[in-house]
Image (cartoon, helix red, strand yellow):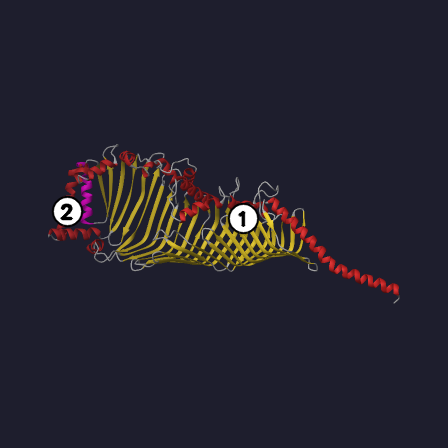
Amino acid sequence: MNRKTAGILGALVICAATLAFATPYAVRKFAEAEVDRSLSRIAWQTTSLVRRGDVTVDVWSWTVNVASIEIIGAGGETRTEIGRLTIVRPSGSDGRMTARRMILDDVKAAGPSETMTIPRAEIRGYAGPERGLTATPGLNRGAKSQADLFENLSIDRLVAPVVTFTAKSGIRRSVRNLVVSGMQDGVIGSATADAITLTAPYLPRTDPDAPSSLLISTGAVRYEQLSLPTLWRFRDGVKDEERRSLLKSASIADLNVSLTMRPGGRFSASADRLDVDDVALSPLGFELSAFDPIATGMRFGSDATPNEVREQLSFTASLLRAASFRKVAVTNARAQISSAGEPQTTFNLGSVQVGPYADARLDTVKFAKAAYEEAGAMKATLDAGGAYGFDASGVLAYVERVARNEVLLTTTPTASEMLKIIPRVKALDAQALDVWTPDGSLKADRARIDLDAPLDAVPQNVMVRLDGLDASPPADSAAQKWIERMELDGLKGSAKFSVTLDPDKNALKLDWLDYSFEGLGAIEASGSFADVDPVLAVASGADFVDKFSAIKLAPFKLTLKDGGAADVLLRRAAAKAGEPPESFRESFARELQETIPALLGPPAEQSGVAAADFIRDPRSAEITLAPRKTDQTLLDLIRAAQLGPVGLAQVVDLQVLYKR
């Protein structure tokens, strides 16, 4: 090697050494400038004070480390601190930042009402606004709200071993092993957590009987298609927004609730699984944080002013209006209440399914295997049941009017308004009901109520059905003594009836009524009343009296089918009179045959004969009652009944038809 070649090689070595030391320094300076530029943009666009610590760069992996980032919002109401931010292969263009990987250590974000802490979080495949994720309206054309910023956020995967939220009200929430996957434009593809807990001082200590603390915990949790933009629009009360999808599905395992009570007691509840499908939200009418002062006042028992009461009503109504869902299902739910000096109460439910719900209308509530027990006082089981077509939209609309101060808090709704306010339900159903108390037991194979109840009127049809009734009163009760006198083992039978109101004709009709009891017999009935004002159902005072007095009588038909009751009653009456049963039966039949025409006149002679035939050989008798005058009222009938048979004969005609 000649001298010239050696000199060139030496110069290259010196140059390489110089570059090896100079390049990291230059890159670090460049990275510091880029970090400062980004932080300055965040500071300007969010009107925040931004500070940072040292910036270091690993050239070979193109990793930037920023220590001690602090962002203080305008007025000091918000503060975000990041102990260390690590960004692997960052890049940015057109106001967006991307990174292959990000690690955040010791994160603390404090707001006006809540503080979030994350000891460590790792993000892979980040793409989001270069300006950060805090919106300041009016300073950015592409992000009018926090929700708009989330719509520009995408993440392949986020892992946070622990996330904690602590509210100034004392409520604390924590999430363990949070994993977020496939977030695109602010919508999380899936999110899971091993456990979630919530603790809270529940109600004011000034109330000696109030619960003192609350604990809620879960096992594994999973969310599918959770929309952060929808959640933040709801939270921030964005105006003029329609309801949007929040969540496709969620499942929560091992849900537990525990409530300690003063002066000594405990409420606990648990469920093996909770599932929620297709939840949608529209924004509240105001920012969620605006309710914090009201909630604090409620919690500490402060007397609410009329304006605060309207704010509470507004918040409640806004929540009911904002949310909708397709289904909520709970599996194997259990609850228990115990307190000093009181019997322990337990409740178990095999399953329950609720939904769809929207605007205070709940389509279906179905449950199975329900059991309730109050130690030593009551036991009840129900194999299955449900409620269908529940509609409280009238109540919700009225509450909204009160919240807007269109109706005074002290105003009592009129009868016509009550027709629109009262909640409706289309059907109630219960199967295999079994109730026990020290006062007796009651069983029923099935009980069902069906109602046709328009929103602006009283129910226009009510059908009630009770099958397989088996009632056993306590041993020394009057009911049990009556059953023994009737020579029955118990009260067993069924009942059903249907009532229809014709609002156009103001006619109330008993379509059919059918009572049937073993060992007694059966009763069937039908009839109607005229001039029935539907408002009567909610009227009061003088208005009620006027409307009730106007009700007119119409023909009423009653069919009696004896199943043993007539014979028992006649034998008992004969024993009381000291006469042989058969002679007493015959004398009573003759007396009845003579009395009916004496009261009602000669046209009733055939009815007297039919009534006597029924007494001699109880089979079936059809009784028809008809008003003597076309304008005879129900009030006339009630007054006449107080005078006995003679009074009734002045108001109604009686026709009896005996059937073998």
Q: Which marked residue is nearer to the observer: mark 2 or mark 1?
A: 1
Residue 427 appears at what percent x and percent y? 38, 47
Residue 298: mark in rendering: none
Q: In the image, is 71 to the left or to the right of 500?
A: right
Q: Is residue 130 above or below residue 533?
A: below
Say which residue label 1 marks: 78
Say which residue label 2 marks: 588
- For the record, the magenta segment spans 601-617
Neighbour class for label 1 at 10 Å: few (<14), some, many (≥20)?
some
- Amino acid type, mark 1: Thr
Quarter location, residue 258: bottom left
Q: Main secondary structure of the magenta part?
A: helix
Toward the viewer: 579 or 83?
Answer: 83
Q: In the image, is 6 to the left or to the right of 521?
A: right
- Amino acid type, mark 2: Phe
Quarter location, residue 436: bottom left
Can the viewer see residue 347 in this picture?
Answer: no
Residue 293 appears at what percent x and percent y? 44, 45
Residue 213 appears at what percent x and percent y? 40, 55
Toward the viewer: 124 or 595?
Answer: 124
Residue 161 appears at what percent x and percent y? 54, 60
Instruction: State the SS at label 2.
Output: helix
Which residue is painted at 85% across and 62% down in the image?
A: 8
Q: Quadrant of the N terminus?
A: bottom right
Count of picture labels = 2
